[in-house]
Image: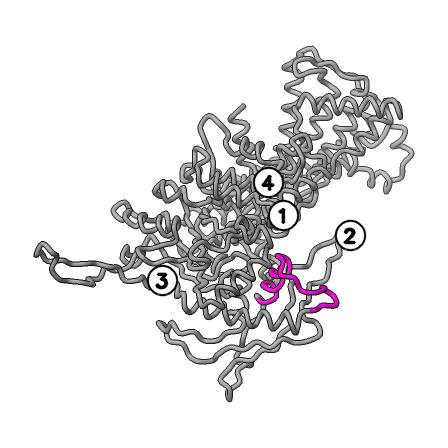
Amino acid sequence: MEQEKNEKKKQIKIDGELTIDSALQLIRYDIPCLILGKSSIGKSYTLIKITERWHIPNQLLYIGSEKAENIEGIPKLTDRGRAKDGKDKEIMEYLQPFWFPNALTITASVKNGRAVYERFVKSAWDVESLKAYSPNYMNLHSLLNGLENLEFTVDDLNSQSKMYELEATLIDINWIQMGSDGSATKARVLNPKKLFSLKKDATAVDANDDSYYKDDLADFCAYVRTALGYGNYWLLLDEIDKVLEHDKDKFAPLLHIVRERTLKNFTMIDINEGKGLGIPLGKSFQEGGYSSIIVDINRLLDAGESVLDTRVIAIANKTENIEEALFRRFCQLIANDILIWRKQDQTTDETRISKCLSDIKKAMVVAGEDGGSLTVGEDLIQYIDEVNLQWEYNFLPKMLNKYDAQGNYFTANSQDEYSKGKSFSYNWNDYRAQTAFYNLLENNFQADKYDIAENLYDCLQTDILGLADESSVGRTSQEEAVKGIAGIFAQKEAEMGLKFAAIDIAANLPKYPIETTQQTDKLNLLVLWTEKVLEYLDACIFSNPTTVRPLSIAEFLVPELTRVFFVSIGSDKSILSDNAATCISMWQDFWQNVLDTDSAFSLDCDKELTVEAMYGGTEQDLDSLSDSALNDIQKDTILGSSSELWSKSASGILTNNQMEDSLQSALPELALTLGLDASRQLFADFSGTVEYINDNVQKELKEMLILFKAKAESFRGDPQKSAARRKYSLAAELTKSLLE
């Protein structure tokens, strides 16, 4: 049972956008995060992209290859003399490393950013459409989103003043949301009636020049970022897992950097006397939210205090060898999908390429190729085996806070998914696994004999869902769920009678997940839907987990549920055959369990509903229909009304999909093993098979031909890939023969 549970967990694939959103939330709450994922999944690229768009001063340190002295600074002799005992005395200090943030420059940037911010709010903010400006989360983030798409160009340079001058409209493109009817709301335009002036000093800056030069765009961002909690300097620790055994002394200074944000005598957080702004748990924020944060920043700037506020983000391909004391200071995020920030910003070509690569990855999974998986091996991941004090008193209170109502991504995401799950009638205990917060717990906690993540979520879910008590979550056992469904059956039966009750129940099953959002995994939704259908079957077949005693409605409901199950899967053109096979296997396992429980089980089903489900109607009904009408009903049948129309039925579609995937895997192996001539002869001996293939999967076969040719060509010139090139060359020739 425990093994099955673990296998189910592995099926959950978290969308890359959700991972990035989770990382940004951790950064905002000043929780050091470690992003773990395979090489080239987009970890460093995405973070650097964010720093560029939000104009964040940053430093990327490749820890694995960086010299230890470049991390902690070079020692310097500062004093030499004689102690009272007459002995020579020498005092060593450390020079500040090259990457350390310049507090004076950053403070000057934030100070000018305040002036630009106040000027925009006073003179440009759209009071008519957006109402009077208030420094809440939504408005501050709209400003940041509007600024991220602006940039100074050569055309903006005023040669006389030696300043770049830009007249801009701030548009929050990320405000666009899709309505239930598929229409999109308009982007949020922050200053539609008046262009806003931004300037930048065009002075050429030397590489090591730490002087401040005015940049209204970057400074405006700096002020807003600081107020939101994103900080004003990012230290990116890349390749943290590539520290060699003899270099493990690097972990000691890194521990101080992550834990105290200090290095020797240098501090990386000056703001509010090194305490930070306290988003979301500080007294100031709790009493006044972002308005109070703005007041605090302004007070510090007016007093001439430093407002340096550093965030630390680590990146790794594995965590197994990271020193435990250091590892436990991070909140780990495991990425098993390509990380893309701002998907809506992709060009048409980029979107097309992304879709192409996604399809290839899926196809590689089907073909059994390792390259189709982006998941880090379980043996390379380190976990925490208890809820330590840092999580208890720091991480979890920040994540579950109720003070940042608009800005708390973890609670908003959980509540959205909870509402969505209720609308689909999904079991929340399964569906919740794809939420950001549950994923975070799964990424960090694991013990041999106790599921920390699941039980921790159980304990905290009323908080994160904003519900009054545990009963609001609807946590029910399987047996209770079955009894509840049986009650629905009884009510419908009393209202409509057995036959029409069965038809109505099947028609009102939870929606089949044809379309999924960016933050859901297709297979997971399919499994949840299948489980729901099986719950209905369970309720009408079992009186309790050990007793098979079908209800009266079973003779009508079983054929109806069978039809809905197979027709739904068969009509889904986007489903992978492996996913379909998983669901069908669950269906078969259910009936095997029925027989294992009662080997003498048999059920006489209503003949009329059964033949309608299988063929589309009785023989008499079918005889009375025209050819076009017969053709139309196939999609709602399991076997089809005739052998000629079988391929358009659920069973025919599923068979053809399976055949397509099998051919894609089998043709290269067959051609290589038997040789081209023998393979051709094998198909020639079974001409009916070739005829069937051409009748049903010809289009797919042509696509395979292109794929095999491309693969063969990609291996050209690589001596180590000569066998693979030959395999796919032969496969292309064999495929071509089948099409002739």
The amino acid on which the numbered mark 1 sits, given as a three-letter code, is Leu
Count residues near mark 4 (Cα–Cα under 10 Å), then give few for <14, some for 14-19, many for 20+: many
The amino acid on which the numbered mark 4 sits, given as a three-letter code, is Gln
Kindly check if marks 1 and 4 are in contact, taking CB atoms under 8 A apart as contact. Answer: no
Between disc 1 and disc 3, whose residue precedes?
Answer: 3
Distance, label 2 to label 3, CA atoms, is 50 Å
Q: Which stretch did the figure color magenta?
A: 126-147
Say whether residue 643 is left or right of residue 579. right
Write the residue at 58% across / 78% down.
166
Between disc 2 and disc 4, whose residue precedes?
Answer: 2
Write the residue at 65% across / 67% down.
171
Distance, label 2 to label 4, CA atoms, is 25 Å
Location of mark 3 (residue): 99
Distance, label 1 to label 4, CA atoms, is 43 Å
Q: Give residue 434's mark.
A: 4
Nearest to the observer: residue 588 or residue 79: 79
Count residues near mark 2 (Cα–Cα under 10 Å), then give few for <14, some for 14-19, many for 20+: few
Location of residue 494 by image quarter: top right
| Mark in front: 4 vs 3 | 3
Count residues near mark 1 (Cα–Cα under 10 Å), then give few for <14, some for 14-19, many for 20+: some
Location of mark 1 (residue): 739
In the image, is residue 259 part of the stretch drawn in magenta?
no
Say whether residue 607 is left or right of residue 293. right
Location of mark 2 (residue): 181
Asked whether the viewer can see residue 680, the reply is no
